Image (spheres, grey):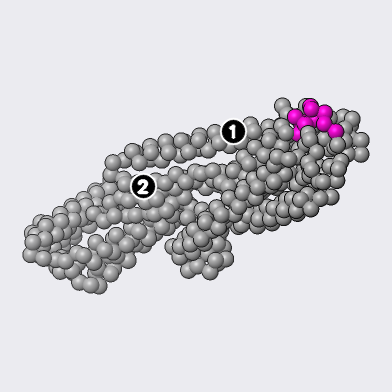
Amino acid sequence: MSTALIVRRALALLVFLGALALAVHLIAELNRVKALKSDLGEINNVRYGLLDADQWVIRLSAVVENRINAFELTDENRPQVKRAVEQVLNTLLVEVERYLRRRNLQATGGSWVDQLKGVLQQGVQDLLIDFDDLRRKVPQYADLVVEELSKPEAKREIKAQLVAFLQNAADTTFAKTDRSRLQTQLTAYGCADVAACDRELGTRIASTRLPVLQQLLGVFALVGLLFLVCLSPGGRLDAGADGTGVAVSPPRFDQFRLFLLTGATLILLAGGILTPMIEIEARIAQLSLQVLGEPVIFTNQVLYFQTKSVFDVVSILMRTGAADMILVAVLLVAFSVIFPALKVLATYLYYYDYQGLRQAGPVRFFALKSGKWSMADVMVIAIFMAYIGFNGLADSQLGSLRRANAALEVLTTNGTALAPGFFLFLGFVLASLLLSTIIENRIGEGHST
């Protein structure tokens, strides 16, 4: 074996091992980022904010407190406040008088004893209570009430009663939100509240973007370099007939290099199916509305977030237990993972007739006839179209939310994006097509060792 061949094989092996190590690290890092993003989506889920009645009580209570604290009795507003109090007192007197007379009249409709009782009650009432005199004194009572309203003790009591009313209304009208998962996340990350955890996870995720991109490009660069080294002109550098190490023409793959290229292709496949391919996210960045002249604001409300790998989807389908879902999971694994991988491996076995397997039915099928059964390229297109569809759907639905009410200010964010797993899977499709095409051409040419 010539020195040039040894050097080339050593270089190819080093590149392959580098691609393998980097891919393993990238898969672990992408899954760690997936967990962080899933936790961040859970922490900011809309059910813990905009859809949680307790959060509305907190915000509305703050508005009520601010308005009450800001209330000051002045010469300008005193007449208006007094008129409002007078109206309330007059209404109260009318209702009290009406109730008493109705009660006494109902008593006169019974036996003679009840009639006598009703007449006596009405007489005593007319003697002791002069409603006309009370109405004349309403302005005086209103002054007293207005003075009491301006005292700090009265403000505190009004605030307490209004807040208690809001809380009671929320408790009796809406079901309590289960916040156990949220609390588990906060405890796991050592955060005091949602805002602190949002900042912490956001910082961690942001810090991974550049390293992940560098590793992804590094894997592609190493795999590309491996293809260049193994497919470079000159063919197999075996010793020539004269022992000078001249390349034999026409060239033919040696098993070592084909093994490395097959392994590199499977590395891309593993990265594609073990890491998220698409992220689907719709969130309300900010929702603001005016209550009593003050803004009530909700921020960073996640309506929907999912980031799944192929195996995650398969796992979810299998856990449903439904026969149709299990069938979909089996077909997904078979046509998008198993068939492409077996085609690459079978082509390798067929090319070198390893242990006489070239004539074996399964090897011949996967090597020569399984192309139309391999759905890897179709899956790539399907994922890309799903990305376009989800992206358009999210934009459309969030846009309709913005237009629903002119008085409601809504800033929405569509975070749907193709994840690194998609590009790894796309790299696998392209690499496997290239490798299969080259090998099938060599098989067709009928070259021998």
Check if residue 446 falls in the magenta segment. Answer: yes
**Whole-percent x, y for residue 419 in the image:** 56, 46
State the separation of the CA atoms marked 2 and 1. 31 Å
**374 vs 98, nearest the viewer:** 374
**Whole-percent x, y for residue 3 in the image:** 79, 53
Residue in view at x 46 percent, y 39 percent:
394
**74 vs 191, nearest the viewer:** 191
**Whole-percent x, y for residue 138 in the image:** 11, 60
| Quadrant location, the C terminus | top right
Image quadrant where residue 121 sits: bottom left
Q: Magenta: predominant secondary structure element? A: helix
Q: Residue furthest right?
A: 356
Under circle 2, the secondary element is: strand
**445 vs 69, nearest the viewer:** 445
**Residue 365 horizontal side relative to residue 101, left or right:** right
Image quadrant where residue 28 sits: bottom right
Camera sees residue 235: yes
Residue in view at x 78 percent, y 49 percent:
5
Between discs 2 and 1, the one toward the N terminus: 1
Q: Which mark is residue 381?
A: 1
Q: Name the residue carrying label 2.
A: 411
Start and end of the magenta stretch? Answer: 439-448
- Amino acid, disc 1: Ile
**Whole-percent x, y for residue 217 in the image:** 58, 50
Check if residue 377 falls in the magenta segment. Answer: no
- Amino acid, disc 2: Leu
Residue in view at x 33 percent, y 61 percent:
61
**Residue 375 horizontal side relative to residue 303, left or right:** right
Mark 2 vs mark 1, foreground winner is 1
Residue in view at x 28 percent, y 41 percent:
406
